[in-house]
Amino acid sequence: MAFEIHEECGVFGIVNSKNAAQLTYYGLHALQHRGEEGAGIVVRRHKLHIEKGVGLVNDVFNAERLSRLTGSAAIGHVRYSTAGGGGIHNVQPFLFRTLKEDIAVAHNGNIINAQQLKQTLEEAGALFHSSSDTEILGHLLSRHKGTMVERLIASLKYLDGAFAFVILTEGALYGACDRYGLRPLVLGQMNDGAYVLSSETCALDLIGAKYIRDLNPGEIVRIDREIHSCSYTKDTHHAMCAMEYIYFSRPDSVLENNNVHSVRKLTGRILWNEAPVEADVVIGVPDSSISAASGYAEASGIPNEMGLIKNKYVGRTFIQPTKELREQGVRMKLSAVSSIVKGKRVVLIDDSIVRGTTSKRIVTMLRHAGAKEIHVRIASPMIRYPCFYGVDTSTKEELIAHLMKIDDLRDYLEADSLAFISITGLKQAASTSQGLCLACFNGDYITNHITINE
Amino acid sequence: MAFEIHEECGVFGIVNSKNAAQLTYYGLHALQHRGEEGAGIVVRRHKLHIEKGVGLVNDVFNAERLSRLTGSAAIGHVRYSTAGGGGIHNVQPFLFRTLKEDIAVAHNGNIINAQQLKQTLEEAGALFHSSSDTEILGHLLSRHKGTMVERLIASLKYLDGAFAFVILTEGALYGACDRYGLRPLVLGQMNDGAYVLSSETCALDLIGAKYIRDLNPGEIVRIDREIHSCSYTKDTHHAMCAMEYIYFSRPDSVLENNNVHSVRKLTGRILWNEAPVEADVVIGVPDSSISAASGYAEASGIPNEMGLIKNKYVGRTFIQPTKELREQGVRMKLSAVSSIVKGKRVVLIDDSIVRGTTSKRIVTMLRHAGAKEIHVRIASPMIRYPCFYGVDTSTKEELIAHLMKIDDLRDYLEADSLAFISITGLKQAASTSQGLCLACFNGDYITNHITINE
Amino acid sequence: MAFEIHEECGVFGIVNSKNAAQLTYYGLHALQHRGEEGAGIVVRRHKLHIEKGVGLVNDVFNAERLSRLTGSAAIGHVRYSTAGGGGIHNVQPFLFRTLKEDIAVAHNGNIINAQQLKQTLEEAGALFHSSSDTEILGHLLSRHKGTMVERLIASLKYLDGAFAFVILTEGALYGACDRYGLRPLVLGQMNDGAYVLSSETCALDLIGAKYIRDLNPGEIVRIDREIHSCSYTKDTHHAMCAMEYIYFSRPDSVLENNNVHSVRKLTGRILWNEAPVEADVVIGVPDSSISAASGYAEASGIPNEMGLIKNKYVGRTFIQPTKELREQGVRMKLSAVSSIVKGKRVVLIDDSIVRGTTSKRIVTMLRHAGAKEIHVRIASPMIRYPCFYGVDTSTKEELIAHLMKIDDLRDYLEADSLAFISITGLKQAASTSQGLCLACFNGDYITNHITINE
Amino acid sequence: MAFEIHEECGVFGIVNSKNAAQLTYYGLHALQHRGEEGAGIVVRRHKLHIEKGVGLVNDVFNAERLSRLTGSAAIGHVRYSTAGGGGIHNVQPFLFRTLKEDIAVAHNGNIINAQQLKQTLEEAGALFHSSSDTEILGHLLSRHKGTMVERLIASLKYLDGAFAFVILTEGALYGACDRYGLRPLVLGQMNDGAYVLSSETCALDLIGAKYIRDLNPGEIVRIDREIHSCSYTKDTHHAMCAMEYIYFSRPDSVLENNNVHSVRKLTGRILWNEAPVEADVVIGVPDSSISAASGYAEASGIPNEMGLIKNKYVGRTFIQPTKELREQGVRMKLSAVSSIVKGKRVVLIDDSIVRGTTSKRIVTMLRHAGAKEIHVRIASPMIRYPCFYGVDTSTKEELIAHLMKIDDLRDYLEADSLAFISITGLKQAASTSQGLCLACFNGDYITNHITINE
């Protein structure tokens, strides 16, 4: 389960709607799986007004707080990472009060040359309020002249790495993607004409907006009554993060015209073709591996059962069991259903293996619940290289698939067999994609600034 | 979806544990699906001490509040119903301060002669603090003499209807079931010897307790260091509520040695045998109909897809969309995934149809998302009779399967076809059950006090 | 400072107002000084509806919660005591759901035969939900027949001790006082005709109601469109608690046609006559002794200075300093102003001495701040006998004026001189009173059930 | 009552204490009267860590949040103003994350050339996150080189207006005052050697710190183990804001070796000499005019009574009465005590008149309560000129004493007579002061940048 290390976020924007903040609230709701640590909304009512806080969208906004946010355009953000320290000052959107106008920025992604840019900017007199790399764009914009689009084009050229920005000014709503399209950003429209930007299509569905198209790599859109599009660079290349298909996105979202659930299901079918095994039940790790498990089961004819249960009410205010209670057997989050697995040969489907600790814990849990054999099948290739485009730990030493060969890893997990989908298989599952970043699997980093010393 | 009208609750108790309140907190967590309106814990530390409140277990208890509840035995309750008015005074457990000792009571079920008992007791001087039928047991106990077990035997004889009581006194923990075993109550044990009572086995699994056995119809257990069992009546009969299999219980729970998920899956398989249809995808209504859908898909060979999505973060503090926003298309709770259903012949699996409004809404939603045909298959028989053992609306006039023949109902839902599992089929799915209450399907009320004027 | 042991409360009721709950909220606000531990409001809208909680009126009620309480009549309560354990179940009003009608009761006072009554009632089958003596009236009412007034007359005869009840039924608002009028209860009227009952007149002033009259000892009023009055006994006697003048009531309230501030000021003047001393400054302990200090200063010509400061923002959620911090000198609540007292001969005016610990601490504080001499003058006579009409510790052994002669007490306090106002002096200050209970000063208990073994 | 328009704040800092954040919490508590809108604490534990929020110190910090703030140095801020919009992003301290080190700034005062500085800085590339003038210092510091003291000296020269800064870096605690000493800042020390900076001495008293001295106009102190002092300018001049004596500071604080209460009392005595009147009672407007009223009463021999009462529990979450309720007579905040004022000739003492609306309301209130004559005496001179050093409305048109001659103002207030203390009288009351800013009374602005077009 990849959630151990990735730092994804969700961004949303809307313009020309009299319910801008309310729709942003619902949009962020649909994007909540991309970040549960903090949420914020900026609304435009002449100037920009902000409300943000630590926690789930529901924790941060109550009816009274939301009702204060009247206006005709808004952007919002849900935040995953605790990198750079938690606390309210790193929660987005960021709001800049320039003499000319207010500017708000929400960001999904990771700027890999953030530290160098920060240093250069500081030497030129910039004063940083946060440890977030999002603030860098604010400083770059303030140091360029011209229209907002001109300033964006000039500023984005400085940034290496992954980004999908949603920006609100007193004049318009803007969206911008990095030259590789590493992070998705889609455009939609409500029945009343309001335009919407969102990290995923599931937010469009929830608010009843029609999907128009994905933003292209390197594209900048300026949206007011109409949509104006341009690029900040001609040097673009389609390479969306493959983990969006495998783990990040909601199964009901559509990426590059692919339904995510269907792609995941296909990875399951392909896994069966690549690594079949005789077994009694197929069990997916909830929630992200349910689709792949269903594909494996359908292809194999082995029944797909609910042998692992996730406690859905466990929120951030949940009181964690003490060590003593954990030793007594208190199991939060996931539990194995012994009436399903006892005496059975189990195919365990998971979406990925990063550090390996979670997978090992699940195998142990199934073994204690009575599983006779456990065959682990992973719906992504081996993650052998660090990701620099949205990950908070950047060393190979934490990646168990970097440290061990597959047989050793199988032994470490105490599984009876272990297989990963091949890179070819993954490409086949997402065959309509225009290009994927597979760097974490094969080390081919699309941006030219990264060298890994093998 | 049956949740429209049923009023289920969850009860939990533990004795001989130094972490009694903590384990009750986790136990209630596992039972949270049985009631999201209120939660309470009573702990024994010489006298009994109570903390309770409105909302989810997580909303009611924070670390500080839980840490106050030290003691060696505890009971807890999660409450579904808002019947009798919401508010803190109807949240359970109820705590009675008698001169002899403190007594706390938590109840799952519905006492059908509550109104008559209340009147008789009031005429004899009883003063009621709540509109809950649970308080009646307290008054009955206080009017009988002898040991607690003797008073329980004498008191329970008065009660008609469904009940599973968990009771804590300064001396012991008690459990009691009605003569039909309408509501489940299971007994388990921790590694350190602590005994546990719970509405469902999923709470045992979560805290690492071993399942021992179900309580029998009419059984009273008194648990201190040991377990003493007796019955308050010899006139008993196995008739557990069939809806526990169909809707109430968590899929990972075990009822009468049946895994609930497996029973549900079997209803899906039987549905296919009873009502096959040519189609492209099988779609279950999340969360309760996922298992049945998987059974239908496996039996038919039609792929099982995620065509409906439930927004899992929608809690009780969620800000509901205004009418205007709903008309603009904002969809909370459930949304249809058009990339899955567009142009497809859909088999829609739901667990039950009560008033019919939810089912109709889902059919419409799928139609708008592009489904070509919609074949509704219901994993329970037609609910044609009111339930008196755990339902807050008791008139047939609200039951759409009472009002309409199946063809009219199909037309009302605007479905292309409609079928319900037969009563025989349901019995077959739960074949190891020792006896089910099927009154809501066939009108055979097990208690002799109910007459329905046809 | 008497607050160490007394358990006072505030009660409020209103009928025939379309803003009943709102006005009760403001009324409770004015009575907040009588109880900061809990607050509750019951409103009548056909049936009775309750909201209550732990904390200040402001903590318990927010705009949303208050807005739910629509109706034409209401009662409210603020609670001081933590006796019987804190927690929501002891917060008032109490609400009883009888078959005939809902009844809500709020109580200020102390029933001295509560334990005997509770035992008798339990033997007759009553079931108690709380450890509060207020619940007893509910049980007595439920065991009598007739109109509510008839049942009140029959029930109140059983109660010994101090009480001022405000009761709301579906039919009317009721007020009732014990035969001695130990606890004040006043009647007022709004411009729009709504009638109001309140523990103190300050609540009438705040909501703009006109004061009509005090309730008499033993009086019951039934208020709907009109006021009906009767008595539950002919054996009545004016004996209001003297501490209402000295400590409990707000200085702007009027008791028996006496402005409380003026009575307190007069105690200060009389104290000067009875116990003059040469000094540089008069300093009153805030807030309750400010009036008496001003009287002493005016009579003596010695300047009245602000030598002690109370931190007004310290609420119940205040984080108390650790022992380490207290030892470092962190002073909450009260601090001495050294720029006022340094090198001065101080007359320290306090309202009362109960256990003596607070007074000793204040003397020490002034000494450390540089006071040269400290002459303690107490605006009430020596409290040598326990109070049974509103006190939670009932043993003489805690009363320092019972344990020590005045010279020893002066030495214990490390004061340069010490004097208390005489009982005659106190009577003179409250000269228009129709009769006071002075039992805590002279041991003359007005109820005949109390014997103190000297 | 001056609170209508002034925007004061409170700042606090401590270094070399193992309880730095706790003591800051208590210090802010003592300074709470200077700002009830927001509070924040930054603590040093290698890097700087911040917690801040909207509301009272008690609302913002709970035990858990405070316990996170471990460290050996801290600064804190309480904020009055809602200028620039409320919300979390304007709450102080501000924290800047520079590559070299973290810097936190808390500010009391008003920078009158903020707008020009902001523009200049933006033109040089600065990016502002807030509308607060405090952020300017951060940008100035980041654009200078050298030691922190060198950068402070260079930066402060740019600032015109009033300021008392408390600054924390990873290396030391700093304090800085403007060249006129317009806003007070005092230095103290705990028994264990920890040094403290505070806006007022009352915070020293509360935490048990010894007062050392006031900071001088233009002084910068750098405090680590020792105190290093310097000045950022030689052009200094003592001119502390006279309103600190009259309204802002707590009566128990000491300003320039004057106890504030004593100065206020003296203004009352002088008012009597300057404007005597025959009357029955003297009544001060609580809380700020109580001291002056006591001085007037003592000098005149007229009794000082509690004829106006302030409801002390009214906090920021208080539900304001609707217009309808206000018209019915609901009175929050202040109420007149008719038992004190009825039929009396009243001398009403208030600290100041700004817009006049509050004073007029109080006169009306007393008249309704039955006062026969009302003689208004104001303990400050007529405020005829806007303040630019801590006021959020800067136009003379709002100052009623600018708009009307005294006789017209008396008629507007509907008072029987009206007098203000003379400027000479005020100087006499604060005779030990080294120099006061009296610009709001006489238009003599100490800073040379202000011109008022008469």
Image (cartoon, coloured by chain):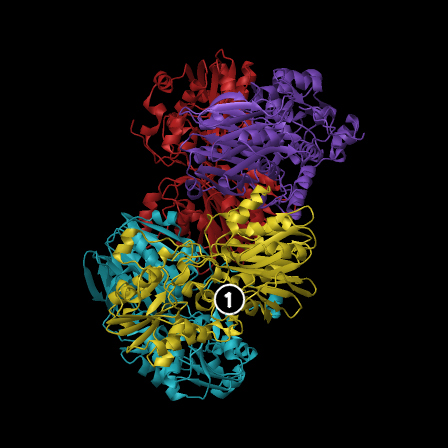
Chain colours: A cyan, B yellow, C purple, D red
Q: From the viewer's perspective, is residue A166 above or below residue A353?
A: above
Amino acid type shown at disc 1: Met
Q: Position of residue A5 (x, y in %)?
A: 45, 71
Q: Position of residue D285 (x, y in %)?
A: 48, 25
Residue at image coords 53%, 45% = B119
The tally of labels here is 1
Residue at image coords 34%, 56% = A25
Q: Residue furthest top?
A: D278
Residue at image coords 28%, 48% = A45
What chain letter is assigned to the residue under label 1?
A: B
Residue A128 visible here: no
- Tell me the residue that label 1 is attached to: B240
Q: From the viewer's perspective, is residue A19 above or below residue C164?
A: below
> If the image is split into quadrants, where does the N terminus of chain C sit?
top right
Q: Position of residue C372 (x, y in %)?
A: 70, 27
Residue C349 visible here: yes
Is C151 left, or right, of A379 in this rendering?
A: right
Q: From the viewer's perspective, is residue A338 above or below residue C215?
A: below
Q: Position of residue C311 (x, y in %)?
A: 57, 36
Q: Which type of secondary structure does the marked residue at label 1 adopt?
A: strand
Front one among B44 and C97: C97
Answer with the quarter of the image where residue D209 lies: top right
Is A49 left, or right, of A283 in this rendering?
A: left
Answer with the quarter of the image where residue C81 lies: top right
Front one among A168 and B134: B134
> If the image is split into quadrants, where does the C terminus of chain C sit?
top right
Is A390 left, or right, of D18 in this rendering?
A: left
Could you classify mark 1 by the number of other residues whose Cα lies within 10 Å: few (under 14), some (14-19), or many (20 or more)? many
